Image (cartoon, grey):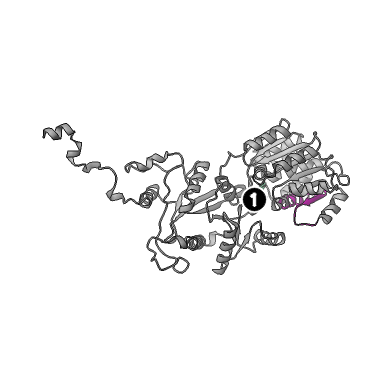
Amino acid sequence: MTKFADLNLSPKVLKAIDEAGYETPTPIQAGAIPHALEGRDVLGIAQTGTGKTASFTLPMITMLARGRARARMPRSLVLCPTRELAAQVAENFDTYAKHVKLTKALLIGGVSFKEQEALIDKGVDVLIATPGRLLDHFERGKLILSDVKVMVVDEADRMLDMGFIPDIERIFGLTPFTRQTLFFSATMAAEIERITNTFLSNPARIEVARQATASETIEQSVVMIKATRRDRADSEKRAVLRAVIDGEGERLTNAIIFCNRKVDVDIVAKSLKKYGYDAAPIHGDLDQSQRTRTLDGFRNGELKILVASDVAARGLDVPSVSHVINFDVPGHAEDYVHRIGRTGRAGREGKAVTLCNTRDEKNLEDVEHLIQKEIPLAENPIQQEAAPEAETQEEAPKKSSRSRSRSKKPDQPQKQENKAPEAPKPAAEPVKSEEPSKPRDKSRDSRDRDRGGKRDNVVGMGDHMPSFIAMSFEDRRAG
Ligand code: AMP
């Protein structure tokens, strides 16, 4: 197995790694660091949680230890899609460069230009920035990019989602042709492929996980929810959420709950607080100081439950999240992989529970199609079927369960639904633990039930076919 000491990193960096408690390099680190130190361009296909940040910061620190920055001319540039991710990368530099003298500046929105300009004026070795803010500084004439020796693009697929690709292309054009480029993306969309073909020169390509694979250390499950009434769907879902949290008990040390819409982030956080849970929201509409406060609280363990939107949580590194709960199944299947990647990071165990109501079922199919696995079904902790009409779940949560009504396995043609019952097919390969899942034939039962059929009185005649049906018309006339 590769050791950090085999990677040609400087002794001061190795010391910092040792102090951080890392024993062995992760696969992206073992793959990317030697090439980066040789000065080659690197194309790293890796999702967050794989240790990719250190795979570019460690060689950068080693390389930048020689030489000094001139005023307004940073020697390296790291581009990140969000402020939080940029701040996180900056923290990584602080950790790994603690025995090396390096200057850095963080250029993100929500911080005054003046402060940032003062830093740039002094000269910085590492400039970490979101693309928009970087170009703002450039346009103010305060920044010269012609001395950039190493440029990192982190989370390029997120940049694409957020519409930053034109900015990235422009920034590439402002840096010297001879720069070294370290480029990271979780997936390789066609547009990302185009950018790498245009701006990277013969890169070492390191792919550490298959596209859209979830970490094997994450135990995944899905809880099917069927509302008793349409106007109660949301409050009933929140009741299921509370029951899931309660059911995890002490195993849930901290959790991120994802909602598809910002408005739900606020509602869910508020509702949890009302019920006495330690929860706070984070999404793009909150001001920066509030976001930072919430995140810091969550990181240092003062806040137990973070309710988040996808954009706000993008690339967040919170190493020890025990649970991810998807309050909704994400509309973009890839976000599922990103979301659950907040837990089970760097080889730790984690649990991801997804709530799925009727509206979410199509999204769930897409997710399962993408990850090529059926997510094991967990019991709905609230029994809904028997809920009397007059009660809301918020008031009377312990009712009967309605489970999975999903229609097909990802690789099965839709048509199979119309067939007569047959022996249940073996379950798809289990994602990890079998513990929270229900047997497949149970889900099959509920599927049939939810399609409106009763298993006992439908479909085909089996052994009980009346004999006249088997006779041909000729026979009957003759008889
Ligand atoms: P990243 O993918 O860069 O967001 O890193 C995910 C987490 O893994 C971070 O909390 C890092 O501190 C941690 N990490 C990075 N490299 C290693 C390593 N070699 N061993 C253990 N943990 C690591």
Q: SS for tag 1?
A: loop
Q: Residue furthest top?
A: 202
Q: Is residue 94 above or below residue 64?
A: below
Task: Pinpoint residue 101: horizontal percent, then vertical percent.
Answer: 83, 48
Who is closer to the viewer here, 97 or 443?
443
In this view of the protein, can residue 349 be seen by the observer?
Answer: yes
Q: Residue furthest front?
A: 477
Residue 167: which quarter of the image? top right
Task: Pinpoint residue 93: horizontal percent, then vertical percent.
Answer: 76, 49
Residue 95 on the magenta segment? yes
Provide the residue span drawn in magenta. 87-112
Q: Mark 1 is on which residue type?
A: Arg
Task: Pinpoint residue 80: horizontal percent, then vertical percent.
Answer: 71, 47
Residue 475: which quarter of the image? top left
Kindly identify which residue carries mark 1.
314
Going by the image, does 281 lie left or right of 117?
Answer: left
Task: Pinpoint residue 12: horizontal percent, then vertical percent.
Answer: 79, 46
**Residue appearing at x 57%, y 45% in the figure:** 334
Going by the image, does 257 lie left or right of 401?
Answer: right
